[in-house]
Image: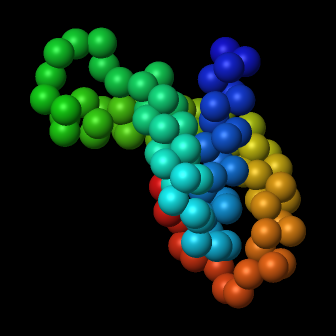
Amino acid sequence: MEYFFALLMAYYTCDEAAKVTVLPRPVISQCGLIYDEMKGHFLPLVDMPKGEANVIAYTRFKQFEASASETIALMREIARQSVAPLAESTQGARPDVF
């Protein structure tokens, strides 16, 4: 579980960074890999079309976030603070990316 929360923290950090600046391509690629790995924790264990599996994984992820809302809020705040220096050095903010 510790690995999963580290992965989730990395995911939220990517999300917060993408809100405040345009990320370089290598960072976008890394964030995409983090997202894919995180999403894998919520994929169904049965064979089904990829689109359906992705919808199920996303729904499960959002249910997980709702069930752990206080923890998720804290993780997002830590991520926001960790990219604050980046935000101060760029102009404007961007909406949620992930």
Q: Which residue is drawn at 58% across and 53% down?
A: 27
Image colouring: rainbow
The reply to whether residue 69 is in sight is no
The image quadrant of residue 60 is top left
Vertical order, 90 against 12 (above or below): below
Measured as percent of width and height from the top left, residue 12 is found at: 65, 48
* Image quadrant occupied by the N terminus: top right
Horizontally, residue 56 falls left or right of residue 60, namely: left
The count of marks equals 0
Measured as percent of width and height from the top left, residue 90 is found at: 74, 81
Furthest residue toward left: 49
Q: Which residue is drawn at 28% across and 39% down?
A: 55
Q: Which residue is drawn at 65% across and 79% down?
A: 93
Q: Foreground residue, 73 or 50? A: 50
The reply to whether residue 5 is in sight is yes
Horizontally, residue 43 falls left or right of residue 79, namely: left
Q: Foreground residue, 63 or 8? A: 8
Q: Foreground residue, 67 or 55? A: 55
Measured as percent of width and height from the top left, residue 42 is found at: 42, 25
Q: Residue at x 76, y 52 (%)?
A: 79
Horizontally, residue 75 falls left or right of residue 62, namely: right
Horizontally, residue 83 falls left or right of residue 40, namely: right
The image quadrant of residue 56 is top left
Vertical order, 57 against 46 (above or below): below
Measured as percent of width and height from the top left, residue 78 is found at: 82, 50
